[in-house]
Structure formats: C-alpha cells, structure tokens
Image (spheres, helix red, strand yellow):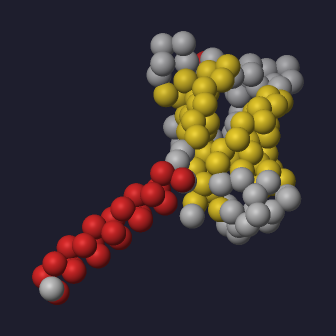
Amino acid sequence: MRRLLLPIVAFAVVVAATGREAVAAVTSKTYEFKADTKLETGVEIGQGLRLDSILFKSPSSIGMKIFSSGILKVDVAVTNLGAEARRFGVAVALFDDEGRLLGVASHGTTFPLKTGRQAVYTLDFLNVNSEIYKATKFKISVEPKL
C-alpha cells in the first residue's frame, strides 16, 4: 500500500503546483515607444493586479540628441484591485525597427502591494544602453508572484 501511496502523493503535489503556476502567468504586451509620453493601458495582469500606465523619462532632451547623457528611466504604475496584498515583477525591453534588443530594465516589489493601492515603480536602463535612442517599440512583461 505504501508503494502505491507515494507515487499518488507525488503526482498530486505536481498537479497542485502546476495549477498554481497557471494562475500566476506572465502578462506580456508590445507597444510603440515614445519618450516623455504617458501610455495609459488599464491591462488586467491577473491575481487582482492592473497595469495602469507606462512613462519613459529621458534624462536630457533639452537642446541635445535625446538620451545623449544620463540614464533612461521608465515609470510603471500598477494597482492592486484584489482582496490580498500581492508581489510581482516587471521587465521592460526596448527594440529598434530591425527587432534588435537595445536595452532592458526590470524591478520586483520589495513589499507586497496592498489591496486598493496603486504604486509607481521606476526602472533604470543600465549597462546595455548605448543605442536606446534608436528604440521604436517596447515590450513589457508583468509576473504576479504567489
């Protein structure tokens, strides 16, 4: 009986874990890149989370070529409409017309976002970013954590 019980319990654990992973799926969307222009999205992410807006902030575009100095930042606003506080991760990738990856920024929640609250997370494009000024589109992915 024990020999039969162990595989059944192992199978049940795998099925339960797989079911939880399906609930916490990554939401990924592609948009046109526009610096210093707020994009209102209202995309439901899952787990009660909503991606509200995305705003790329250029470091210095006054009198110079955009992104000529400093670091590009992106503000990502997320609201928790669920019944429980939630953690999540965010990744933003910039691409040019040829589909080349020009830069990536990512962030995760330090503390769970409380229910009924909105938070704005600022992500920095560090290290691989010398051609970010050529960006024409971006992809954002948000992954709720269980």
Question: Horizontal and vertical percent for residue 50?
Answer: 74, 45
Q: Quadrant of residue 104?
A: top right
Nearer-the-camera pick, 56 or 29? 29
**Residue drawn at (60%, 54%), measured in percent from left and top?**
144
The image shows residue 115, relative to residue 59, as above or below, that is below
Question: Horizontal and vertical percent for residue 23?
Answer: 54, 53
Nearer-the-camera pick, 135 or 130? 135
Q: Is residue 82 left or right of residue 134?
A: right
Q: Is residue 145 left or right of residue 76?
A: left
Q: Quadrant of residue 138?
A: top right
**Residue drawn at (21%, 79%), measured in percent from left and top?**
6
Does residue 75 appear anywhere in the picture?
no
Nearer-the-camera pick, 87 or 94? 87
Question: Horizontal and vertical percent for residue 31?
Answer: 66, 23
The image shows residue 133, relative to residue 46, as above or below, that is above
Nearer-the-camera pick, 124 or 6? 6
Does residue 78 appear anywhere in the picture?
yes
